[in-house]
Image: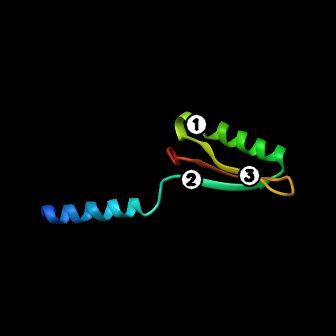
Amino acid sequence: MAPERQKPADIARRLSQRSAKNRSGDSWRRETYTLPRGEARDKAREWFVKYPKAAYMTEIEFWRELSDGQIEFTIRRLPSAD
């Protein structure tokens, strides 16, 4: 039995649906932490060792010091090899 031939319109529709699905969210993986300063530094270092900037474009996207002295930060990376 021969495979069913697709019409160009079918292919275009499938590709546009796939493209719309990919645009629905960005591809970054993010984690937000609230930790004491030393632990925050260690957690960020752990991420940069596990997900090197050169391969995953890892970066601290946002950080701030809270009134209780803890550090809240969001770190992001690409899911390159997940």
Residue 39 makes an appearance in the image:
yes
> Considering the numbered disc 2 on the image, is that residue within a helix, a strand or a loop?
strand
On residue 13, which mark appears?
Answer: none
Residue 50, located in which quarter of the rendered image?
A: top right
Q: Which label's residue is closer to the chain start, 3 or 1?
A: 1
> Considering the numbered disc 1 on the image, is that residue within a helix, a strand or a loop?
helix
**Residue 5 drawn at (x, y percent):** 13, 62
Side of 16 relative to 44 (left or right)? left
Label 1 crowd bin: few (<14), some (14–19), many (20+), radius 10 Å: some
Label 3 crowd bin: few (<14), some (14–19), many (20+), radius 10 Å: few
On residue 64, which mark appears?
Answer: 3
**Amino acid type shown at disc 3:** Arg
Distance between the alpha carbons at the discs numbered 2 and 1: 13 Å
Q: Residue at x 60, y 49 (%)?
A: 76
Q: Which label's residue is closer to the chain start, 2 or 3?
A: 2
**Residue 55 drawn at (x, y percent):** 53, 36
Distance between the alpha carbons at the discs numbered 3 and 1: 21 Å
The residue to which callout 1 is attached is 53
On residue 29, which mark appears?
Answer: 2
Examine the rendered structure and indicate whether residue 21 appears above or below residue 78. below
Among all residues in the image, which is located at the extreme top? 54
**Amino acid type shown at disc 2:** Arg
Side of 17 relative to 63 (left or right)? left
Q: Residue at x 18, y 66 (%)?
A: 10
Distance between the alpha carbons at the discs numbered 2 and 3: 20 Å
Determine contact: label 3, label 1, CB under 8 Å. Answer: no
Q: Which label's residue is closer to the chain start, 2 or 1?
A: 2
